[in-house]
Image (cartoon, rainbow, N blue to C red):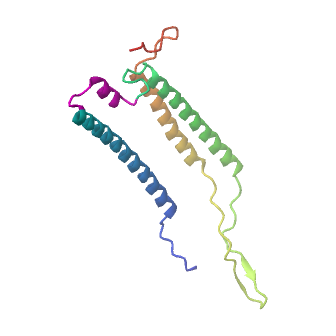
Amino acid sequence: MDTGVLHTGFDAGALGFWIFIAAIVVAAIWSGSRREAEKHETMRRIVEKTGVVDEGKLKELFKPASPYQGRDKPPGGGYRALRVTGTIVMFIAAGLVAYSLIRAHAGAEPPQSQVRPMINLPNGRSMPDLSWRPPDPPFNPVHGLAAAALVALFGAGLFCSSRFLPLPPPSGSRTELPAP
């Protein structure tokens, strides 16, 4: 039955979300380039006024933004991060398995009739109930288990890829970096 509503599949909310994400990315890139341009402009003005390049001012102006101030990060950080992230993702996969099995067990109902109910009108005639919609199809746990398998494989990949990174130092050794 034609209800007069045209469904195009267009979702303005999703479009707005992706436009917002693109605007954030563009703003971050623009901000970084402006920051670098200001540093170069400041250095150019210093050279114009003094005529010499001061090594200390140059290092101060162009110092790295890392909290380690140009020093190497301690070894083992990436190893730990991949191990922890992989473990968390695999536990999420186990939760998806549990959810799928519980929902499949709880939703095991006999199929309902697909016949549209009728409304009896006062003049003795009847018409179909337009507010009725067919029942949802029964939940298929295979879909949830397949999604859980993909998530578990992703977590296992994260966990196993940590072996390609440097190991953290032994627990009794010194882990902080020496002062410059």
Q: Residue furthest left?
A: 51
At horizontal 47% and vertical 70% (from top left) the residue drawn is 8
**Residue 42 in the image, given as x and y percentages of width and height:** 30, 37
111 or 49: nearer the viewer: 49
- In screen coordinates, is 112 left or right of 96? right
- Residue 17 at x, y percent in the picture: 49, 56
Q: Residue at x 36, y 45 (%)?
A: 29
Q: Residue at position x 31%, y 27% from top? A: 57
Q: Which quadrant of the figure has residue 71?
A: top left
Q: Tell whether position 114 is magenta.
A: no
Please, which residue is most extreme toward the top here? 172
Q: Quadrant of the C terminus?
A: top left
Indicate the position of residue 84 as horizontal and vertical percent values: 53, 27
Q: Is residue 126 left or right of residue 80?
A: right
| Residue 63 against residue 38 in the figure, above or below | above
Q: Where 154 sits versus 143, above or below?
A: above
Instruction: Residue 14: give x, y in percent of width and height.
Output: 49, 59
Q: Quadrant of the N terminus?
A: bottom right
Q: Which residues are magenta?
A: 50-65
Check the image and name the residue furthest to the front: 49
Question: In the rendered structure, does residue 51 fall within the stretch colored magenta?
Answer: yes
Vertical relation: 6 (above or below) 30: below
Work out whether residue 102 or residue 12 is closer to the camera in this orientation and state it.
Answer: 12
Of 35 and 136, the residue lying toward us: 35
Could you tell me which residue is drawn at 35 percent across and 41 percent down? 35
Quadrant in the rendering for residue 120: bottom right
